[in-house]
Image (cartoon, rainbow, N blue to C red):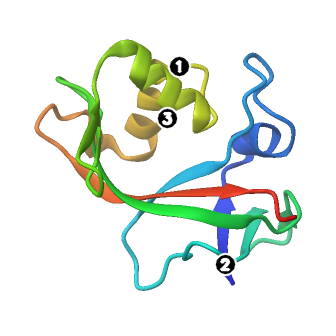
Amino acid sequence: MVAYSFNKRFVEPIATGHPATGVVKRQTIRADRARHARPGELLQIYQGMRTKHCHKIIADPVCVAVEPVRMALAGMCYVHFLGRDQFFHVPRQLDDFARRDGFLHWAELQAFWHAAHPESSDPEARFTGVLICWEPAR
């Protein structure tokens, strides 16, 4: 079982849905690491891991997909799903992707990434990692 920790701003979108859109966050974008979840495995979804305020956000969901992605967050923005060679690059696609990731729209996702990863504001920068998706366990 793999555990993922989330920023406080994502607790409500994960637990009950984004307050403005109602969309429940059931995905996360992560950098590559030695071991990510695999489809069919249960996940542990926490806020504040490794702190005294650590708590589980939802009951353990099941991983339904892990997909390699590449993103450009400045300049010519896109999300490239490497496994299926699909691009999201038009504003509506990017906004839909951002909403599924717990944001109101693409601009809010960009602002979050630029604050957390200042290098992402460089138009030449690319992030490569994985998109992990889950559903409630049955």
- Asked if 105 appears above or below 81 in the picture, the reply is above
Q: Nearer the viewer, mark 2 or mark 3?
A: 2
| Mark with earlier residue (2, 3) | 2
Q: Earlier in the sequence, mark 1 or mark 2?
A: 2
Residue 24 quadrant = top right
On screen, 78 above or below 8?
above
Q: Residue at x 57, y 72 (%)?
A: 39
Residue in front for this viewpoint, 80 or 113: 80
Q: Is residue 50 above or below residue 84?
A: below
Query: Residue, x 80% and y 33% (percent of image)?
Result: 17
The tally of labels here is: 3
Q: Residue furthest left?
A: 124
Residue 31: x and y in percent read: 39, 64
Q: Residue at x 24, y 28 (%)?
A: 74
Element at label 1? loop
Can you identify the residue that label 3 sits on? 112
Tell me if mark 3 has few (under 14), some (14-19) or many (20+) residues whose alpha carbon lies within 10 angstroms of its own: few
Residue bearing the label numbered 1: 105
Crowd class of label 2 (few under 14; some 14 to 19; many from 20; radius 10 Å): some
In the picture, measured across the screen, residue 71 lies left or right of residue 21, that is left
Q: Earlier in the sequence, mark 3 or mark 1?
A: 1
The residue at which mark 2 appears reads as 41
Distance from the alpha carbon under mark 3 to that under mark 1? 11 Å
